[in-house]
Image (cartoon, grey):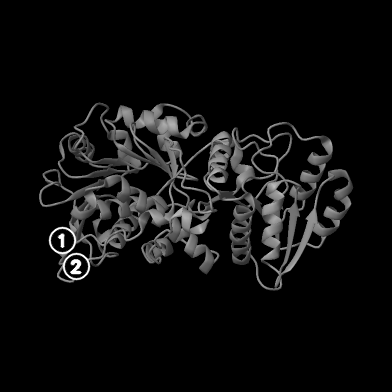
């Protein structure tokens, strides 16, 4: 199940309910110590030095419990009760350049400004420019507001416990949080709260997409029509098609302007490539349509714009719109049964709202809901760090996978093709939200896998890696881990 985004008060209530039913704090701390230790092992090698900085509260207890599970590694524990007295020791340890610093100074309870001695200590850690793993929240960061209380640790990774806290997702918090990861199974009772914003977990996609029948044929997995590419932007058509192929739709047909047909057709084999002409009936014999990637040339046939507007209003099959075609969508209501998906990046989303990208980014959930409202309650994939998925009504979902290496031309084309290739499959149309969420999650997960394999991967590598990950494992009930 997705993890609801909660506030600090709700986290405290959740803990109290757990203690009332018999689980003890020491049991949860022991469990959290195991989780931290496991993540530390994934981040270092046997010869690396690990520095654990522990405060006097439960956040420090969590990291002390982790140290007990890391006896075979080179681990130094620095317990900080008085920041002024500990500054010399911390400075000396940082000068040894540990491969990882585990931050357990403060937890989510901090809600007042730190004094000058704590600020100086935190500044010393940040100035060392070492890789930091913060436990639950970067020390000094208010987990409700996402603002530092005078100073905050700048983490590479924040491993938050139980559920994501709302402040960790705020734009202001990103420079401190780094990559946000959630450890949901820490021994508490099942989360009693719901939230309009939810954190996607890989386990949400257990057994998804479902296994294919041994008697299946290509007709069982749908037909996808793509309209993409133009002079100077032909690569977008190729990358989109390859993304769709990785979704393994039954048949894929790319329609591209005559000016780029030869160069596009020469790069694709299994995808059928045809020249665009205005009399195309794209929904005919197709189960989904994708329009937009690479349709940016000034001499683009006007009929493509007209066809996009008509399909948005009338097509009975799922329609995915990306890139330049986002500007052609007519405003207004749509029948609820129509599946419409748009995939804007922040700049495109800002343009749809007549705002700057920065203004849009200041409140991504609100921006997503307003775009969806204007465009008939369509599904919106608002790309960027922690891609947001949802529509005007209903829950929103934050995607946890992916990394900054996705910030290169073409990665969005691969994603739109992958989404459309999945939605072309009739079995995956019954729950379009889950299908869209899975596509976004796997796209990011593929980028994460590539980061472990090579330094300088490119978008063509992403298209090759997409869909090659191991299927998520079935999650265990929370009580089994208590």
Q: Secondary structure at mark 1?
A: helix
Q: Is residue 223 above or below residue 452?
A: above
- The label number, if any, that marks residue 298 in the structure image: none
Q: Residue at 47% x, 53% y: name it.
A: 478
**Is residue 406 or residue 171 the one in the foreground?**
171
In the image: residue 299, left or right of residue 140: left
Position of residue 199 measured from the top left corner of the image (x, y, whole percent)? 45, 45
**Of the image marks 2 and 1, the number of the one nearer the N terminus:** 2
Residue 379 visible in rendering:
yes
Q: Is residue 187 above or below residue 142?
A: below
The 10 Å Cα crowd at callout 1, few under 14, some 14 to 19, many 20 or more, is some
Q: Residue at 66% x, 66% y: name it.
A: 69
**Is residue 326 or residue 175 the one in the foreground?**
175
Residues at marks 2 and 1 touching, judged by CB atoms closer than 8 Å: yes
Q: Secondary structure at mark 2?
A: loop
Question: What residue is shown with label 2?
Answer: 213
Q: Is residue 13 above or below residue 386?
A: above
Position of residue 275 measured from the top left corner of the image (x, y, whole percent)? 18, 53
CA gap between label 2 and label 1 equals 10 Å
- The label number, if any, that marks residue 220 in the structure image: 1
Q: In the figure, residue 147 lies in which quadrant? A: top right
Position of residue 118 measured from the top left corner of the image (x, y, whole percent)? 80, 41
In the image: residue 451, left or right of residue 77: left
């Amino acid at each position: 199940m997705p993890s609801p985004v909660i506030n600090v008060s709700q986290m405290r209530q959740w803990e109290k309910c757990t203690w009332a039913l018999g689980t003890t704090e020491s049991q949860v701390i022991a469990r959290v110590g195991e989780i931290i230790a496991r993540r530390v092992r994934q981040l270092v090698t046997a010869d690396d030095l690990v520095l654990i900085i522990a405060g006097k509260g439960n956040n420090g207890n969590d990291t002390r419990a982790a140290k007990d599970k890391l006896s075979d590694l080179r681990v130094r524990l620095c317990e900080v009760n008085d920041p002024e007295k500990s500054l010399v020791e911390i400075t000396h340890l940082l000068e040894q350049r540990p491969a990882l610093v585990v931050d357990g100074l403060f937890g989510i309870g901090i809600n007042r400004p730190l004094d000058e001695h704590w600020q100086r200590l935190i500044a010393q850690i940040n100035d060392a420019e070492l890789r930091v793993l913060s436990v639950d929240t970067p020390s000094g960061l208010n987990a409700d507001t996402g603002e530092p209380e005078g100073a905050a640790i700048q983490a590479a990774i924040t491993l938050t416990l139980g559920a994501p806290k709302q402040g960790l997702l705020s734009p202001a918090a990103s420079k401190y949080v780094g990559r946000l990861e959630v450890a949901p199974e820490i021994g508490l009772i099942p989360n009693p709260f719901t939230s309009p914003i939810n954190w996607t977990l890989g386990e949400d996609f257990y057994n998804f997409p479902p296994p294919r029948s041994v008697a299946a044929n290509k007709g069982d997995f749908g037909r996808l029509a793509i309209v993409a590419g133009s002079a100077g932007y032909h690569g977008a058509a190729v990358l989109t098609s390859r993304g769709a192929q990785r979704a393994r739709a039954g048949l894929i047909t790319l329609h591209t302007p005559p000016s780029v047909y030869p160069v596009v057709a020469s790069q694709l084999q299994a995808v059928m490539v045809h020249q665009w002409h205005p009399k195309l009936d794209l929904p005919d014999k197709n189960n989904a349509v994708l329009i937009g990637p690479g349709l940016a040339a000034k001499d683009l046939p006007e009929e493509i714009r007209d066809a996009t507007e008509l399909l948005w209003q009338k097509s009975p099959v799922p329609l995915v719109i990306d890139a330049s075609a986002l500007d052609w969508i007519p405003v207004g209501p749509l029948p609820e049964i129509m599946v419409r998906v748009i995939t804007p990046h922040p700049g495109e989303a800002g343009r749809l709202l007549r705002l700057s990208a920065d203004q849009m980014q200041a409140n991504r959930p609100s921006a997503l809901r307003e775009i969806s409202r204007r465009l008939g309650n369509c599904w919106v994939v608002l790309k960027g760090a922690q891609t947001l998925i949802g529509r005007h009504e209903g829950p929103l979902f934050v995607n946890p996978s992916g990394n900054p290496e996705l910030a290169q031309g073409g990665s969005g084309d691969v994603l739109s093709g992958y989404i459309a290739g999945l939605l072309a499959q009739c079995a995956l149309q019954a729950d379009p939200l889950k299908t869209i969420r899975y596509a976004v999650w796997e796209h990011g997960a593929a980028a994460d896998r590539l980061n472990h394999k090579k330094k300088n991967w490119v978008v063509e590598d992403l298209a090759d890696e997409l869909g090659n990950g191991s299927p998520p494992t079935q999650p265990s009930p929370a009580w089994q881990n208590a």
